[in-house]
Amino acid sequence: MTYVVVGAGPSGVIAAESLRKSDPDGEIILIGDEPEPPYSRMALPYFLVGNIEDKGTHLRKTAGHYESLNIKYVQDRVASVSPADHTVTLASGATQGYSKLLIATGASPVKPPIEGLDLPGVHHCWTLADARKIIDLANDGAHVVLVGAGFIGCIILESLVKRGVKLTVVEADDRMVPRMMNQQAGGMIKSWCLSKDVNVLTSTRVTKLEQSDDDEDILTVDLDNGQQIPAHLVVIAAGVKSNTAFLEGSGVEVKEGIVVDKYLKTCVDDIYAAGDCAQGPDIAGGWSVHAIQPTCADHGQIAGKNMAGIPTPYKGSLVMNVLDTIGLISVSYGNWEGKGDGVEILDAPNYRYMRLEFDGDRLIGALSLGRTEHVGVLRGLIQTGVKLGEWKEKLKEDPQLIMEAYVATKYV
């Protein structure tokens, strides 16, 4: 049996390890398209601020880890997949046969339609190579413009602040982290950033990037409000999209991501998908792309077992994000937008906020800002779907009773 895993991020690496545990004798080939050992993008902020060296980003730090598991690591890119003859063609021109194939190619940053994105000094922060370029330019006192204040943008934001730059954040939506926070919480994060001397412009778009006439090391950032901002560095964080283009003509169904069933199998025999490129089951009963590392890890583990012939259904992922924005912790879980049956508690001067969303007597979503004491409890109640009974009304009267509700319903 030959297992080919395409993608060397967390999903791919964990899947390869899961395969080896389930099948001690099968051939396992892990294909990654970067000139680095497999690493975690979630470690890049720590690399940016100098807390770790590039080796600290590596997913497995023991020398010879993959060799010890008899996993062959190939540094190349898959250009196409041919299910008819069970082969993948690599960018180098080589072909590789497979018995079972896992697509774990993750996502790539979106390139917004802004003139001048190819100028020197404009970078995404998605790869180790990107991070090295940003480090060269994000020096103490440098003027930096960050385009995008979503989840990834806000992670990068903190790293840039720690590097001592003069930072301006430009976000097209009317609030920060709009896919994670509602108007109230997103506005509070903006106020927090402003209090930390970060200039945040919401409901604003970058229209053009130009080289300065006076200094070749300076870019001019044109905004749709007529303002111009000088920058030594522009970082683009305008979202990501699943890497699926190479599957054209393969018969694999792709919507928001690669559509998989509860066993993470695609509509094509012997092909599976996992991680940021997979549109898999969620606990709400739908099929979604959850581009977060916990989901990637779960996908990799489950996919490996199923590929090795151990039927293991995936129970579904939970939409969740935990974000540290210059010391302010924010959390969103599940269907935080809710269906109108919710309650909130606000302490704006102290940057504390919580909102709970219910469906019947179940907690289906939550937002939390500046309140870290109940993060695990909120996740537990939402993920288990436990019936709250009388505790729903108690929580609607006082959301701060969340711990008491958890203890009361834990063993129901």
Image: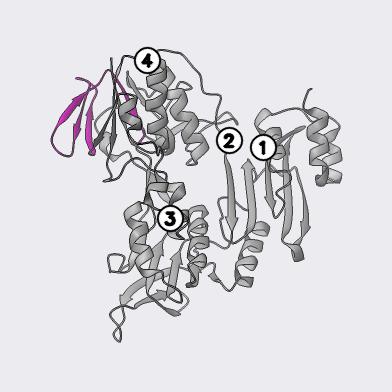
Q: Answer few, some or many: residues within 10 Å of disc 3's Cα (few below 14, many 20 plus, some between 14 and 19).
A: many
Residue 158 spot, x, y in % from top left: 53, 61
Q: Residue furthest front?
A: 63
Q: CA distance from mark 3 to mark 2?
A: 28 Å
Q: Which one is earlier in the sequence, the residue at label 4 or at label 3? A: 4
The amino acid at mark 3 is Phe
Q: CA distance from mark 2 to mark 4?
A: 29 Å
Q: Nearer the viewer, mark 3 or mark 1?
A: 3
From the viewer's side, name the closer residue of 233 and 159.
Answer: 159
Residue 410 spot, x, y in % from top left: 77, 27
Q: Which residue is mark 4?
A: 23
Magenta segment, which residues? 77-104
Q: Indicate whether 360 appears above or below 261.
A: below
Q: CA distance from mark 1 to mark 2?
A: 9 Å
Q: Which one is earlier in the sequence, the residue at label 1 or at label 4? A: 4
Q: Which residue is mark 1?
A: 379
Q: Which residue is mark 2?
A: 318
Q: CA distance from mark 1 to mark 4?
A: 33 Å
